[in-house]
Image (cartoon, rainbow, N blue to C red):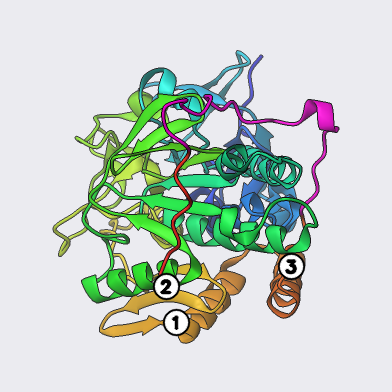
Amino acid sequence: MTSTETGAGRPHVVIVGGGFGGLRAAVSLADADVDVTIIDKRNHHVFQPLLYQVATAGLAVSDIAMPLRAVLRRSKNVRVLLGEVEDIDTDTCRVQLYDGSHVEFDYLVVAAGARTRYPRGEEAQYVFGLKTLEDARAIRQRVLTCMEMAESEPDAAQRRALSTFVVVGGGPTGVEMAGALRELAMTNAGMGRGHLSEGDVRVVLVERGDRVLSSFDPPLSESAQRQLEALGVEVETATDLAFEGPGRVAVGGESLRVGAIVWAAGVEPVSLAEKVGPLASDGRVEVAEDCSLPHAPRVFAIGDIAHCTPEGHSEPLPGLAPVAMQQGEHVARQIRRTIAGKDREAFSYNDRGTMATIGRSRAVAQRGKMRLTGTLAWFAWLVVHLVTLVGFRNRMAVFLNWAWHYFTFRQGHRILLPSATQLDRPALDPAPDSAPEPEARRAS
């Protein structure tokens, strides 16, 4: 089976990936004299910065996801193809799909994104990633299941194990996840009438480096750690995590039985990167100054999959949504310029700052020389994410959910779908007979 472009001799632009970069490229080409096919293995766009709120019952899946066809419904020259790319042949200008079909292109934009960099070996089975909607739902199911089990668990050691959660990685995702987990657990414990109390709930954030949010200025990293600890999160820096068995890890010399481990210790390019072109040391695709491949100028790589170091930057750009969106606009403009016979431009990144939220009225943000912490940074974070979110309906839903949570101190999506006999219950190693489970430490 063959899938080809539908235009009458017009250039065919194929975009692989419907994330921030791919979607922005498609929208930017909506009125161009080209035919555009966007290929994704899922039929929806996900606002990944808010995945952790789905994982912690703050938002519903539909609040941060929108069908690609709905987003592009007014773009008459853009079609959406549900499929997964198996291989890319830059010589024959052909994209091969896993179902055996192929799509021919005149220009190709690879925006396939990244995946969670899991620990190696069988230890990976003990952790949850946070990169897709499926990941977020799995974390929510596990955490809520642990809370329900702890409510009815009379044994103190077992109850503490069920209500202990470890987040690995002190970047923005890990910090946001740890803060939200702590707030969810505290709220859930406060609503119950069983054995679980707020003091049983323990959230531990493990960071191998010497500080959390290492991409931020040191004073903001210190502020973020103080805000986390004020919320009740235990922050362990310059520390490695060691797996000791199902539901058991060692952190900072302490052996912990845990209900769930969330792995936020970095991402890596998807396997498709190896089929695109030469790779940099970090596994990402090396691109030229205009984001095209040096050996194939009509093929572009953008977003998390691209190793891009613009002029004036000493390090490659990080895998952030603003980077991908700006690159998406840039490559769309370069395709237009190439078709018009004009010279291409080098990509220039406009850094609009970075931010991370920690919890209710807790956040840090920096842009240029501006530094914000606490409530002001939190409001800035809210505004930026609402504006960036795709779809008016999603913006309204998220705003109303946030307002409800702010004024009622309740998360509204604590629904467990399976029956009690089908829940994803954690596998916990038995407590050692030689020593009792240590009491949960209280964060100062």
For discs 1 and 2, the disc positioned in front in the rendered view = 2
Distance, label 3 to label 2, CA atoms, is 20 Å
Most common secondary structure along the magenta stretch: loop
In the rendered image, which residue does mark 2 sit on?
227
Is 235 on the left-hand or right-hand side of 419? left
Residue 186 drawn at (x, y percent): 63, 62
Q: Amino acid at mark 1?
A: Gly
Q: Nearer the viewer, residue 253 or 57?
A: 253
- Circles 3, 1 touching at the beta carbon (< 8 Å): no
Location of residue 379 (image quadrant)? bottom right
Residue 422 among those drawn in magenta: yes
Residue 354 among those drawn in magenta: no
Q: Secondary structure at mark 2?
A: helix
Q: Is residue 431 above or below residue 144?
A: above
In the rendered image, which residue does mark 3 sit on?
410
Q: Amino acid at mark 3?
A: Arg
Region of the chain picked out in magenta, as a range: 414-436
Distance, label 3 to label 1, CA atoms, is 21 Å
Q: Amino acid at mark 2?
A: Gln
Location of residue 161 (image quadrant)? top right
Q: Is residue 226 above or below residue 143?
A: below
How packed mark 1 is, by other alpha carbons closer than 10 Å (few <14, some 14-19, many 20 or more), is some
Rendered-image quadrant of the N terminus? top right
Residue 404 drawn at (x, y percent): 76, 74
In the rendered image, which residue does mark 1 sit on?
374
How packed mark 3 is, by other alpha carbons closer than 10 Å (few <14, some 14-19, many 20 or more), is some
- In the image, what residue occupies the spot 69% across and 52% down? 196
Distance, label 1 to label 2, CA atoms, is 8 Å
- Circles 1, 2 touching at the beta carbon (< 8 Å): yes
